Image (cartoon, helix red, strand yellow):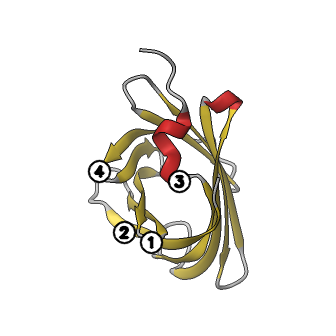
Amino acid sequence: MGRVRVIEVFAPLFGHWQGVEEQSASPWGPATTARAILSFRAEVGGSAMVSDYRQVRADGSEFYAHGVFLVDPALEVSWWLFDSYAEPPAVATGGWRDGELVLSKASEQGRAVHRFGIDGEELTYAIDIAVPDDSDLTPFLRGRYRAISTH
């Protein structure tokens, strides 16, 4: 198989999205609501997708992240998310499952499952976490976003 161009795999996500989130209490902070902006675009000649994320929480604090997505010929996705907590990222892996991009990772902090999907005109983003990693997954973040521009 040849090189897979990310536009073929990630087309539904491309563009700029803005919306609201609900975040549950966690070891990193209290429960909160937030506004967020996400963007997804092809880079490196179409061989990678990158994402930018900015979250502004109800108390005014902010969180930033930059993601790099790669896809192999078997259509398995690898994702590295660099964030404003400045910890080296663990790679999340997965792919499209039942209309959602599902990516799982494990690190010293625990396990996380990230799900991106399209629901009509909206992007949905959900994170479930297990802290410690041998505990059950619980909802951590739920977000819904509207396209503010597409590519």
Q: Nearer the viewer, residue 84 or 12?
A: 12
Q: Position of residue 71 (x, y in %)?
A: 48, 31
Q: As shown in the figure, which amino acid type bears the numbered disc 1?
A: Arg
Q: Quadrant of the N terminus?
A: top left
Q: Are marks 4 and 1 in contact (CB under 8 Å)?
A: no
Q: Nearer the viewer, residue 82 or 68?
A: 68
Q: Disc 1 marks which residue?
A: 142
Q: Disc 2 marks which residue?
A: 139
| Disc number lying in front (2 or 1) | 1
Q: Is residue 85 left or right of residue 145?
A: right
Q: Residues within 10 Å of mark 1 (few under 14, many from 20)?
A: some
Q: Is residue 67 above or below residue 77?
A: below
Which residue appears at 45% of the width and 76% of the height? 24
Q: Are marks 2 and 1 in contact (CB under 8 Å)?
A: yes
Q: Earlier in the sequence, mark 4 or mark 1?
A: 4
Q: Earlier in the sequence, mark 1 or mark 3?
A: 3
Q: Are marks 4 and 3 in contact (CB under 8 Å)?
A: no
Q: As shown in the figure, which amino acid type bears the numbered disc 3?
A: Leu
Q: Is residue 43 above or below residue 36?
A: above
Would residue 44 be visible to someone looking at this image?
yes
Spatial CA distance of label 4 from label 3 is 31 Å
* Quadrant housing residue 93: top left
Q: As shown in the figure, which amino acid type bears the numbered disc 4?
A: Asp
* Callout 2: SS: strand
Q: Position of residue 132 (x, y in %)?
A: 37, 55
* Callout 3: SS: helix
Q: Position of residue 21 (x, y in %)?
A: 53, 76
Q: Are marks 2 and 3 in contact (CB under 8 Å)?
A: no
